[in-house]
Amino acid sequence: MDSKPNQLCIVVPCYNEEGALPSSAKVLGDLLHSMISDNLVSADSYICFVNDGSTDRTWECIRWLMGQSRMFRGISLSRNFGHQGALLAGLFTARADVYVSIDADLQDDERKIPEMVAMYHGGKDIVYGCRDSRETDTWFKRTTAGLFYKLREKMGCYTIPNHADFRLMSARAVAALKQFGEVNLFIRGIIPMLGFPSGKVFYARKARKQGESKYPLSKMLPLAWNGVANFSDTPLMFCLFAGLVGCALSVGLMIWAFCQWYSQSTIPGWTSIVLVVCFFGSLQFLFMGIIGLYIGKIMRETKHRPVYIVQDDLTRPAP
Ligand code: UDP
Ligand code: MG
């Protein structure tokens, strides 16, 4: 990365944020102004609000902001696609050298953006915003988030602890993200798979000032399920394990049933029924586990994830 200031785009997904937008736009606008005057980013840097099918006056508010300054730009989606979809829409539609994604309520500390950009100039393609405390969360959110990240880790999914979607990405990291054609989105799980030099900044998350959370449990659970099921076939491996244990148990049971029959302490017909039930029961378990292994492979194939990502290509002669 060269030393001349690069064009920055701050991507802000917005769903029913008419309450938060005016003050957040002012804060982000002032921040961007100061970054431009400090020569940290180029003068054509901008903030891209993504209206995610809001039912309130969010889009009108974005249009109004666009009339106030060229620094504010907007994208409006045809309906509500959810935070993850809105974020990708912003990253893939806006053109810039470097992108920072941040929520419209500015619960994440926007004052860390200059530090992120400085790290980008220092050679990082991805800079993760990580919370150093969860004090502003409810007990429920804190506990379930902790359990969720532990579960992901146990299932072999690499996770950046205490990181959501406040991050910086270089244009080439965003281009690499485009190669992942996923529709069940859990973006924070994909980003570490991109590779590239990365760093972290730490901040304390603020409480939401305007409006209320657009992430109720009904949206959080599908996201959490995507976070596990998109990245791990451990639940399927569990089927195979249960099949093998079931097989071993039923062999034991069959030997026991046979001994009972041999010592003539069973009623006629019992042994044959138990043997048949155990035999076919254990076969079913085992075959389900084997089918699970194939389903795991099919899952990976259908995702069409890239098998490699080029960081530097020096095959062409320099101009
Ligand atoms: N958001 C969105 N689409 C949705 C839900 C949320 O674009 O369907 C945006 C929302 O406007 C905010 C960000 O995603 O900018 C995070 O949402 P929120 O702050 O409500 O989540 P929380 O911080 O409570 O987890
Ligand atoms: Mg929030």
Image (cartoon, rainbow, N blue to C red):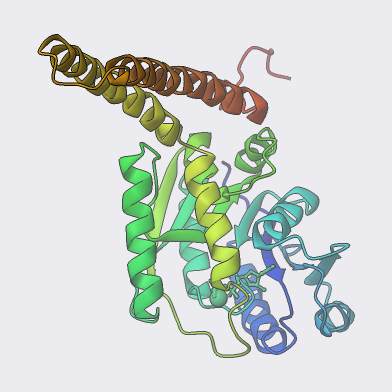
Which corner quadrant of the image does residue 265 belong to?
top left
Residue 257 to residue 214: above or below:
above
47 relative position to 193: left or right = right
Residue 305 to residue 82: above or below:
above
Ligand 2, image quadrant it occupies: bottom right
Residue 256, percent from left and from top: 16, 18
Residue 127, percent from left and from top: 47, 52
User: In this orientation, which residue lies closer to the viewer: 161 or 293?
Assistant: 293
71 relative position to 7: left or right = right
List the single residue furthest toward the front. 268
Image mark count: 0
Which quarter of the rendered picture does the N terminus lie within?
top right
Q: Residue at x 54, y 40 (%)?
A: 230
Which quarter of the rendered picture does the C terminus lie within?
top right
Q: Residue at x 72, y 60 (%)?
A: 86
Q: Residue at x 47, y 23 (%)?
A: 288
Q: Residue at x 70, y 90 (%)?
A: 19
List the single residue furthest toward the left. 263
Residue 286 to residue 180: above or below:
above
User: In this orientation, which residue lies closer to the viewer: 205 or 64?
Assistant: 205
Q: Is residue 310 visible?
A: no
User: In this orientation, which residue lies closer to the viewer: 175 or 297?
Assistant: 297
Q: Is residue 108 visible?
A: yes
Residue 227, percent from left and from top: 50, 48
